[in-house]
Image (cartoon, helix red, strand yellow):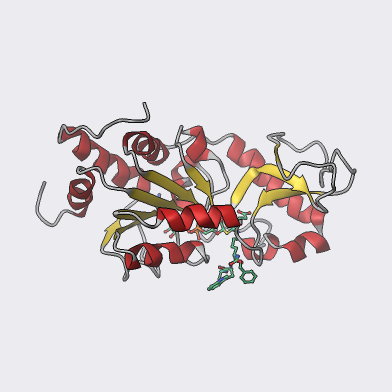
Amino acid sequence: MTPGDPVAELAGRMKSGPRITVLTGAGVSAASGVPTFRGPLGLWRNYAPEQLATPEAFRRDPKLVWEWYNWRRELIAKCVPNVAHTVLAAWSRRYPDFTLITQNVDGLHEKAGTINVVRFHGSIWEVLCWRRCPSSPERWWDESVPLPNIPPSCPYCHGLLRPGVVWFGESIGSSVLDRSYEAVKCDLFLTVGTSAVVHPAASLVAEASSLGAFTVEINPEATPSSGAVDLAIQGRAEVVLPSVESLLKNQEFEIRDSRS
Ligand code: BV8
């Protein structure tokens, strides 16, 4: 461990088996081939996500919005978790008090075997009736690729379906917020692969810090959080996370693996 090496510092803080909470964004899925929102590939037919991921856009043109989601579902269905996902999945099973809060809707953390995932913005693989018809469940899983019809119909009332994600201008689910605000009471808070511009997800780092967590950012670029965290590691998730893991492995320490 060279002194001043941020990767070694992070590994050093993990070896005691602290309470760990990780917040992830689109950057964690970049190596899997899922385009990030605000990167060069973030546009679809020249629309920015903020123009399509809203109830107003859906009300105005449900077909266009579903074409965007269908395109993303088809793309994501071909993607597999990358080593950043698999390292986080291993940590979720190794550390007794570990929570992963993801802004991503792609489901790759769950596909990698991560447990205790909080889906802060929902899932692209869930749907619900747009008008919440009384005979339909609150939401349900639908992995059909491509969608049989665009826009898809509710099988219970034959009205519109909507994607099971949180749109701009919509509130985060109360149980998701409760779990997240419980999880920020931790020793170590990592924010990985997020531009930290979407709230309230972006505020979780400051919340954790105010409660005494040591905060770490992993991102190849600076973000609005970079100046506020205790340790900013400039690098890609699929490089930094395995580097931390290999240091942890070489230090031959055992955390009570209560979840094997
Ligand atoms: C709400 C689901 C109450 C849909 C998404 C306070 C301040 C300012 C604004 C607001 C505020 N409070 C509320 C707002 C409004 C709004 C908001 O935040 N707007 C922003 C744009 C200014 N927030 C809301 O509306 C939220 N609701 O607050 O409810 C309310 C109600 C009414 C009115 C007001 C408030 C709901 C927001 C949820 C929106 N839904 N997604 C879908 O996916 O289709 S957000 C969308 O952005 C995705 O979920 C995404 O995860 C999220 C954040 O983006 P990132 O994940 O960070 O991705 P991005 O591309 O931006 O960045 C990628 C990063 O990765 C970069 O930093 C890059 O450097 C890095 N990277 C690249 N490669 C790698 C890498 N990192 C590591 N390794 C690599 N290899």
Classify residue 31 by image quadrant: top left
Determine whether 153 is above or below 258 in the image: below
Comparing 245 with 184, the one in front is: 184
Query: Dividing the image into four equal quarters, which quarter contains ligand 1?
Result: bottom right
Comparing 19 with 201, the one in front is: 19
Q: Residue furthest top?
A: 260
Q: Is residue 240 left or right of residue 174?
A: left
Comparing 109 with 98, the one in front is: 98
Residue 174: percent from the left, percent from the top?
Answer: 59, 57
Q: Residue at x 40, y 36 (%)?
A: 89
Residue 186, can we see it? yes
> Quick one: quadrant of the C terminus?
top left
How many marks are shown on the rendered structure?
0
Q: Residue at x 41, y 46 (%)?
A: 99
Residue 41, can we see it? no
Comparing 21 with 84, the one in front is: 21
Q: Is residue 207 left or right of residue 256?
A: right
Classify residue 77 by image quadrant: top right
Q: Residue at x 20, y 44 (%)?
A: 16
Q: Residue at x 47, y 47 (%)?
A: 30
Determine whether 61 is above or below 10 in the image: below
Residue 81: percent from the left, percent from the top?
Answer: 47, 36
